[in-house]
Image (tube, helix red, strand yellow):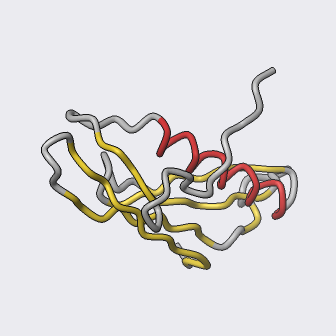
């Protein structure tokens, strides 16, 4: 994954322990499947798993927009054993959008 943007967040447990969560956004790329659109990889390191996942869209812009929403979902609903409070620059607004409800 060619990283084009990265953000570090603080994750605080109920006991006060703090760790760093790194969000990486990859460069959008054409989907290699015939008739495919574009994919934009993301990775959230240090929260639950470090797996690279891809958001797909019709073009590079839509793939990037969906990737940002995917990050927002991963951060809003982490699969952690213990609850954590995430902040960016001591602010609970992490700067990643969530999809609009239908």
Residue 5 in which image quadrant: bottom right
**Above or below, comparing residue 3 to residue 99 in the picture:** below
Q: Residue furthest top?
A: 102
- Total count of labels: 0
User: Which quadrant of the rendered structure holds the C terminus?
Assistant: top right
The residue under the point 79% across, 50% down is: 57
Residue 50 position in % (x across, y down): 34, 56
Residue 40 in which image quadrant: bottom right
> In the image, 50: left or right of 25?
left
**Above or below, comparing residue 4 to residue 37 in the picture:** below
Residue 99 position in % (x across, y down): 72, 36
The residue under the point 30% across, 46% down is: 48
The residue under the point 52% across, 74% down is: 6
> In the image, 28: left or right of 22?
right
Q: In this orientation, which residue lies closer to the viewer: 29 or 61?
A: 61
The residue under the point 21% across, 45% down is: 13
Q: In this orientation, which residue lies closer to the viewer: 65 or 101?
A: 101
Residue 27 position in % (x across, y down): 66, 73
> In the image, 58: left or right of 96?
right
């Amino acid at each position: 994954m060619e990283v084009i943007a990265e953000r570090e967040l603080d994750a605080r447990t109920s006991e006060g322990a703090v760790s760093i969560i790194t969000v990486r956004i990859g460069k959008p790329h054409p989907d290699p499947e015939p008739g495919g659109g574009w994919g934009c990889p993301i990775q959230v390191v240090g929260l639950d798993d470090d797996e690279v996942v891809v958001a797909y869209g019709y073009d590079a812009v839509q793939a990037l927009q969906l990737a940002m929403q995917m990050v927002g979902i991963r951060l809003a609903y982490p699969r952690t054993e213990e609850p954590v409070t995430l902040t960016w620059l001591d602010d609970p607004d992490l700067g990643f959008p969530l999809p609009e409800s239908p």
